[in-house]
Amino acid sequence: MRTGNYESSDKSTAGTAVTFLLIGLGAGALVALLLAPKTGKQMRRDLRRKYDDVRETVEDFAEEAKERVIDVMALMGDTVDNIPGAKGIGEKGATELIQKYGSVEKALEKADEVPNKRYREALQ
């Protein structure tokens, strides 16, 4: 190892600071890679598991949403598809009833408990 006297110059202080900064960043990145709690393979595996869990949740939600759309259409009716629906219940009312009771069948079972008089009469 060589030792010696080094002279500093007023002109190169910015370059020296940048050099030491880059050396420090490189050393920090190397230490971070060496001391990382998980390897890249483990991180990819964990991310894949999380992605699969989220995808399953979205698929379940989509299935439930499809069922609810069918129930809403059954309550509000649709003239294009020749679905009569319940008289006096529109999109807003059908959505409220399905959100509260979960299905057409449950809404019909609990028709006496529906607070809105028009909806209650339409379900009975």
Image (tube, rainbow, N blue to C red):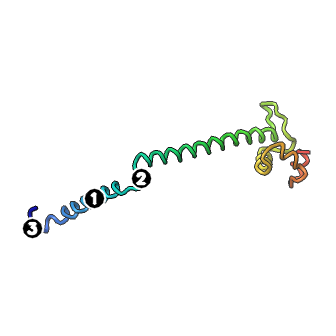
Whether 85 is drawn above or below 23: the answer is above
What label sits on residue 71 in the rendered view? none
Horizontal and vertical percent position of residue 41: 42, 45
Residues at discs 1 and 3 in contact (Cβ within 8 Å): no
Residues at discs 1 and 2 in contact (Cβ within 8 Å): no
Q: Amino acid at mark 2?
A: Lys
What label sits on residue 6 in the rendered view? 3
Horizontal side of residue 65 vs 97, given as left or right = left
In primary-sequence order, the first of circles 1 and 3 is 3
Which residue lies at the image location 47% right of the left edge and 45% below the top edge? 45
**Which element type, helix, strand or loop, lies under badge 2?**
loop
Which residue lies at the image location 66% right of the left edge and 41% below the top edge? 62
Which residue lies at the image location 30% right of the left edge and 55% below the top edge? 30
| Along the line of sight, the residue nearer the viewer: 4 or 1 | 1
Name the mark nearer the viewer: 3 or 2.
Answer: 2
Which residue in the protein does label 2 denote?
38
What label sits on residue 27 in the rendered view? 1
Categorize mark 1 by other alpha carbons within 10 Å: few (<14), some (14-19), many (20+): few
Could you tell me which quadrant the C terminus lies in?
Answer: top right
Horizontal and vertical percent position of residue 49: 52, 45
